[in-house]
Amino acid sequence: MNRRDNLRPRHMPRHLLSCFATGLCALAVAAVPRFAGPESSSSPSTVPSGCQVERATTAPARVDLAQVLSDVYELEDSRQVKLFHGTHRGLDHALAALFDPTTPKSKLEQFYTLLFYISQYASHPGHEILFDLPKALTLLQSSKVFSDPNFPRQIVRIHLTRADRARPRYLVAFATPEVWLPLNKGMGFGVIREGMCQHAKALVFYGSFSFTLTRPHQNIVASEFDNVDLWGVFGTRGFVDIDINYVSVKSVEFLNGNAMGLVRGKVSRKEFEINQHSYLLEWITKFITNKSVQPIDW
């Protein structure tokens, strides 16, 4: 394993002198990389040689809304008990708005919002629901919420816990212990931030992943993620040099009416299993969460 961080200070403004004495301020500022998004605020002339800044090519595809609604109402649990006793006008309107092609949304937002609506409107009496897998996969295909239509075929289990219907929690399990989902049709998302080319390339799922969904106001929030990392090239250049490959996303709030999201995340513990870093960096990143508003999709 190679050392991935260089804590040698370069230029230190006077107002950071006292902070540098402890060594923690520099790490607090630089330890958590900003996430790469599909758009960069940098002009093409500022892009360093070899840094490919990609724009998103994952705009939501048009769906057959009637087919999506039909597949939703066909959903069953593993004992073939239907999740819906009949159609629901509120759900019909909600899904029509969700898949309206004139309103900018990411596939990622459509995926999480669809699952939130299913939990909210389902008339199934159970607090624990194990989905009938073939019918659930049929819906994931017709709703086109994944850029790669083959990805859902790796799912072997979908489980919903909704003792509190305002906070449903889903667990999605895969057939293999590690599944990689390339972002932006394999091109990833590049952006110039923190003095370097940041490049988000893939999501990594470790056998399964789980998350909680809420809607505190108008926006859907996915949070409390387990077993999923964002993989790519992240870090910082300048006051300190740090290279990071694995970032753990803690929550995403999808901002209503556009394709942006408020993303919170921190350096993944996987990073320290794969790459060698200083003990101080490993310790300080346990307590630091980065927050940024940016386009986000898969």
Image: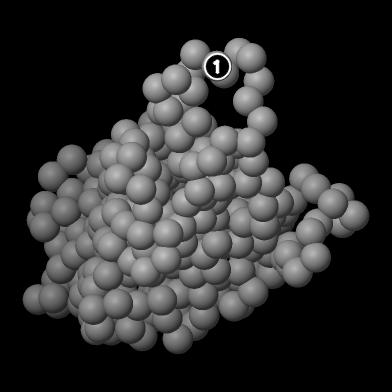
Q: Residues within 10 Å of mark 1 (few under 14, many from 20)?
A: few
Query: Where does residue 256 sit, x and y in percent of width and height?
Result: 57, 40
The quarter of the picture where the N terminus appears is bottom left
Residue drawn 29% across the image and 40% down it = 283
What residue type is disc 1 on?
Leu
Q: Is residue 54 above or below residue 195?
A: below
Which residue is at 64% across, 74% downward? 187
Q: Nearer the viewer, residue 228 or 70?
A: 228
Q: Residue at x 33, y 40 (%)?
A: 280
Q: In the displayed structure, does residue 253 sit left or right of residue 36?
A: left
Foreground: 62 or 212? 212
Residue 297, position as x, y percentages in the image? 55, 60
Q: Splitting the image into 4 quarters, where does residue 22 fall?
A: top left
| Residue topped by disc 1 | 17
Q: Is 46 situated left or right of 199 in this image?
A: right
> What residue lies at 80% left-to-right and 65% top-to-bottom?
49
Residue 110 in view here: no
Badge 1 marks a residue whose secondary structure is helix
| Percent x, y of residue 245 | 46, 61
- Residue 53's place in the image compared with 155, above or below, is above
Determine whether, in the image, residue 167 is placed left or right of residue 98.
left
